[in-house]
Image: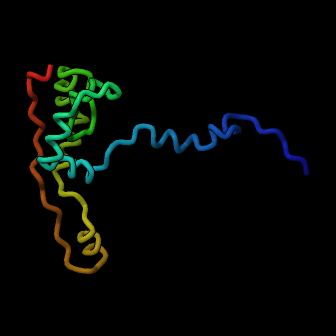
Amino acid sequence: MVKTKQYGNHKSDKKKHIAKTWKTKRKTKDLDQIHADMKPEVAAQLLKQEVDYDVTGCAQHYCLHCARYFVDLRSMKEHFKTKIHKRRLKQLSEEPYTQAEAERAAGMGSYIPPKKVEVKTQPVEEDMI
């Protein structure tokens, strides 16, 4: 039996895992990671970052809830009005999933519904311009 020549896009090693690269291209932080970032001490560090020229907007305009950097203050304010940001706030309003909740769901205790957490859009300082 003779091996035939491959045709198409998936023949080189660089393109071997093309599906995986497309799935992980726009990967953002998970909700539990964002809940950890919303703690006051961590949030203060994220909102007051040093100038970093490798990040969009020199790391000066950061949406804490969506884990995104913005070019300027105006684009960040526009982002606060979008559906994407409002959906993320709604997702974050539920308490993050814990190991104790997983054990209760598996039958190792009685079920307690997740609590609601009040999440508001971060305050915007005008002197960041």
Q: Residue most toward the bottom?
A: 108
Q: Residue at x 20, y 39 (%)?
A: 46
Give left or right: position of 7 versus 57: right
Which quadrant would residue 99 be assigned to in this image? Answer: bottom left
Tell me the residue at 63%/37% (across/down): 14
Q: Determine whether 87 is above or below 73 in the image.
A: below
Specify whether 75 is left or right of 28. Answer: left
Q: Is residue 115 above or below residue 84?
A: below
- Indicate the quadrant where residue 72 lies: top left
The percent coordinates of residue 103 (x first, y second) are 28, 74
Q: How many marks?
A: 0
Q: Residue at 39% of width from left, 42% of height from top?
A: 27
Tell me residue 33's x, y (percent). Answer: 27, 51
**Residue located at (15% from left, 19% from top):** 129
Q: At which x and y percent is residue 74? A: 18, 20
Judging depth in this view, the residue of 3 and 42 nearest the camera is 42
